[in-house]
Image (cartoon, rainbow, N blue to C red):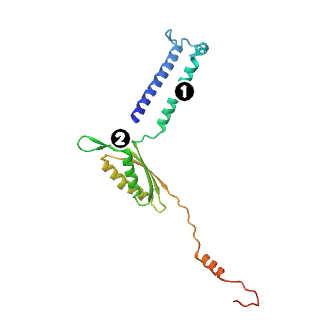
């Protein structure tokens, strides 16, 4: 998907650049006195690119509005697809593992993510971990989110994640390097209600005593 997206980006940017260069260059050339060809849409300094007659030429034709709406709808859908593809993170679905015999093996990206997450949760002070692989399958990058317990030390947890979980996953996959971006977040625990022991004792003493009227004997 990333290769297709790069190709689409290059084609779209190249076409836009050619259109802008041709349109702007022609308007500048005509404005400076160059004589355009007879079929060109702009033929003079005081001419406009689209005249009223050009804009209304096919308006009365029966096929004009359906074709115009269909073309605009396709352009909108393509623009939305391109925008979503740009904003979405490029997730690695498989990683190329060097087997040492000149032929690489393919490792599922989700399996390596689970290994990294399990190794991170084994670190003291890390309660939950989530890992996503991005980049290219030959040189992936890890994006990790670690939820730390209240007693955890962020620096130590980050160091242990790097020297244990990250290094183990890198060596197991035979990668030359495995860069990682780690985000730390503290887990908030709800406070527990604790009743003081003196309150309980006082409540028991009050429940065990009885009220007596003056001049009467207690039973």
Image height of 47 relative to 154, above or below: above
Residue lying at the far left of the rendered structure: 101
Q: Nearer the viewer, residue 55 or 158?
A: 55
> Could you say where residue 168 lies in the image, as x and y percent from the top left?
33, 53
Between residue 206 and residue 194, name the one nearer to us.
Answer: 206
- Residue drawn at the location 41% of the way across and 59% of the way down: 156
- The number of numbered badges drawn on the structure is 2
Distance of label 1 from label 2 (alpha carbons) = 35 Å
Q: Residue furthest front?
A: 219
Q: Earlier in the sequence, mark 1 or mark 2?
A: 1
Point out residue 158 in the picture as x, y percentages from the top left corner.
41, 55
Q: Is residue 44 left or right of residue 206?
A: left
Callout 2: helix, strand or loop? loop
Residue placed furthest toward the top: 38
Q: Secondary structure at mark 1?
A: helix
Q: Quadrant of the C terminus?
A: bottom right
Give the vertical position of 147 relative to 50 (above or below). below
Q: Which residue is mark 1?
A: 73
Residue at image coords 49%, 36%: 84
Q: Quadrant of the N terminus?
A: top left
Is residue 123 placed above or below 171 in the rendered structure? below
The tag on residue 177 is none
Q: Select label 1 or label 2 by which is in front.
A: 1
Residue 137: which disc?
A: 2
């Amino acid at each position: 998907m990333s290769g297709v997206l790069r190709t689409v980006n290059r084609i779209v940017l190249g076409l836009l650049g050619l259109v802008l260069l041709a349109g702007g260059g022609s308007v500048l050339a005509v404005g400076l006195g160059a004589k355009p060809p007879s079929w060109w849409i702009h033929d003079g300094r005081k001419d406009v690119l689209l005249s009223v007659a050009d804009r209304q030429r096919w308006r009365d034709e029966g096929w004009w509005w359906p074709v115009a709406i269909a073309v605009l709808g396709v352009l909108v859908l393509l623009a939305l697809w391109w925008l979503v593809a740009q904003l979405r993170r490029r997730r690695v679905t498989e990683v190329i593992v060097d087997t040492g015999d000149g032929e690489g093996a393919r490792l599922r990206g989700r399996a390596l993510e689970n290994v990294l997450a399990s190794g991170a949760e084994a670190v003291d002070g890390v309660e939950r971990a989530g890992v996503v692989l991005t980049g290219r399958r030959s040189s992936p990058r890890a994006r990790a989110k670690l939820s730390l317990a209240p007693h955890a030390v962020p620096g130590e947890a980050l160091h242990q994640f790097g020297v244990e979980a990250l290094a183990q996953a890198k060596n197991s996959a035979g990668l030359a390097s495995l860069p990682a971006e780690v985000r730390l977040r503290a887990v908030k625990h709800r406070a527990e209600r604790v009743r003081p022991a003196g309150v309980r004792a006082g409540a028991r003493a009050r429940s065990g005593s009885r009220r007596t009227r003056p001049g009467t004997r207690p039973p």
